[in-house]
Image (cartoon, coloured by chain):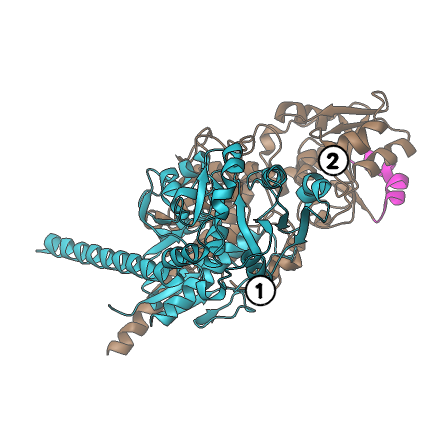
Chain colours: A brown, B cyan
Amino acid sequence: MKRLRIAQIAPVATALPPTGSGSVELISWLLTEGLVRRGHDVTLFATGDSTTSARLSAAYPRGYWHDTSMWPWELYEMLNLAAAVERSSEFDIIHFQAAYYPLSLAFARLCPIPLVQTLHHSPSPEEVRLWSRYPEAPFVAISNEQARLLAGLNVVDIVLHGIDTDSFAFSDTPDDYLLFLGRFTDGKGVLQAIDIARRTGHRILLAAPEDEYYQAKVKPLVDGERVVYVGEVGHAEKVKLLGGARAMLYPVQAGEPFGLVLAEAMACGTPVAALDRGAVREVVEDSVTGIIFPDERAMCDGLPRVLSLNRRQVRDHGVARFGAMRMVDEYVAVYHRLVEAHRVHAREDRSSVSEVRA
Amino acid sequence: MKRLRIAQIAPVATALPPTGSGSVELISWLLTEGLVRRGHDVTLFATGDSTTSARLSAAYPRGYWHDTSMWPWELYEMLNLAAAVERSSEFDIIHFQAAYYPLSLAFARLCPIPLVQTLHHSPSPEEVRLWSRYPEAPFVAISNEQARLLAGLNVVDIVLHGIDTDSFAFSDTPDDYLLFLGRFTDGKGVLQAIDIARRTGHRILLAAPEDEYYQAKVKPLVDGERVVYVGEVGHAEKVKLLGGARAMLYPVQAGEPFGLVLAEAMACGTPVAALDRGAVREVVEDSVTGIIFPDERAMCDGLPRVLSLNRRQVRDHGVARFGAMRMVDEYVAVYHRLVEAHRVHAREDRSSVSEVRA
């Protein structure tokens, strides 16, 4: 296959790779590393304090996440993308990962090379209505669940996320606790997770950034014994927490377009107990890497079955399905397809000009 | 002069012309009407419910101001601008009026015709630092005061705002009150205006939209007799209020880049008592259309002199300086200059290509 010149546009909120949470940053970084590993010529548009094997193009020394002078942040994302579009003669394709997504729509028609975007959230009907003004702009969806919401738009492929499975150590002998890992929101179901742990007589550890939701709704339930708050965790601590958990509880309430923590748990051999919402069925292999339940009550009743799943099998299936290079190769295929379609299209444009002249 | 094909990009927050406040919308609309009157071929990019003598290009039926489903609103402004840039072969120049201003910076280098923007606020140092990544992008400033803040950027001209002076009736016999007209903010100095009226023994009327600031800080001072709140006013009511005022108090605290209400007061023959901040000296002719004071105490002491200014002279000077067609003609000159510079630049590019070939 031809070596591609790829501009990868990461969010400019923080440095890449992210030290804490930040799934979009993590996916952008992993994809970039994998593309370089596959021999492509990659320029990463990210903050100046990022670390990458690609060529780094930094419009800003640092990200806007903790800098209120960089406001509104959307403008910084926009100018980061514009910097790549301005240099489009140097690339075969531009891949935009950051919010907000219409940024790339606005530039797509002005860009002489393909500009593709991966969507990282579940779009609202209002968003899709706005985006439908650009029916030709190519999207990559991260699940069928998300692609369904993008009906009417140009979804060129579905590429499930990948993770750096090597950095998640397999653990065959967990400690005696359940784990909730994610943000503290109603949508993520932390209160349901605590309730399920209590009702089934298990200890639960909660790992997430401390915020107002935590103060108001979670903290009153934390006793430091049966319900333990461990704060926001870095990668090493996360791997340890995941490996030590007998199961991860994922009583997600909102329909999520993916669920990266599910793949991360699997990579440690930790089975997941998940509610049947959003993309869960696309991430969890039912009765293999976890069990999918219709509601919280069924999750309570079926938790022993989750705990009895074979952890080695959980790990092997998780690694096979969510290895980063699988994701990288699928994106490379998307890039080749778009570049080729664009080349054919440009040739047709030229030949129709010749016809007119003839 | 050559007839220009002009794309005028208004904000898409509300319909044009605005029914209530909205100085950016008003200026965009007046400029568009004047350009049509001067015989130019103008396309106005605005909401579908706008009224204009130009060709209307509407990406959205209505504005986002009262529609939370159109969020974040910046995206709607961006796609409205992008719609014009996509059609740049139909225009000689694109003039962008809406916030946020870096929107047009991001598109300027991708746009094959000149893209100029008028700035409508006082930029912060952080904003100017961001914008300085595009040192070639042309700005029109609305005052010397604002141009000063844009140091290092490409300020191609300063064009003071104009108003539809015909729609402001001259009033030679005012009632016995002072007027505060604007938004209720610390920067606009409404509390100082009330205090000055009290200390000088005058009745004061306050016209502005009701908001939290009003509830918290202004309402306790309103007694319905000496301090009267009249709410947000439409145009007809505004003209009546202005004409009936013996003077407008403008104890502005923040440095504003213009002060449209000052020009509107003048057009009714109403002199202004203004603090020497921001662009006040560029809008008020001291001792002719109003008096400029260093502080509130001086304003109290000097108020009788303001009230004794000749109202006919205030009107005549105001109309001469702030007529809409003066603004229109200055913008046309800017457009011609940018279009010509662009043409010369393109020709030079072509001849340098020929030189290389020769």
**Residue closest to the eye, A247 or B351:** B351
Which element type, helix, strand or loop, lies under badge 1? helix
Above or below for B244 versus A221: below
Pointers 2 and 1 within a single chain: no
Horizontal and vertical percent for residue A103? 50, 51
Say whether residue A321 is left or right of residue A205: left
Q: Which residues are magenta?
A: A294-309
Residue A300 counted in the magenta span: yes
Say whether residue A206 is left or right of residue A143: right
Looking at numbered disc 1 in the image, what kind of residue is underneath it?
Ala
The numbered disc on residue B236 is 1
Which element type, helix, strand or loop, lies under badge 2? loop
The numbered disc on residue A344 is none
Say whether residue B255 is left or right of residue B143: right
State the residue at coordinates (40%, 57%): B322
Give the spatial CA distance, label 2 vs label 1: 52 Å
Residue A313 counted in the magenta span: no
**Residue closest to the eye, B68 or B239:** B239
Looking at numbered disc 2 in the image, what kind of residue is underneath it?
Phe
The residue to which callout 2 is attached is: A184
Horizontal and vertical percent for residue A232? 68, 27
SS majority, magenta:
helix
**Which chain letter goes with mark 1?**
B
- Any part of residue B316 in sight: yes
Residue with the most extreme left position: B358
**Which chain letter goes with mark 2?**
A
Estimate how packed mark 1 is, as few (under 14), some (14 to 19) or many (20 or more) residues with alpha carbons within 10 Å: few
Horizontal and vertical percent for residue A3? 37, 46
- Mark in the foreground, 2 or 1: 1
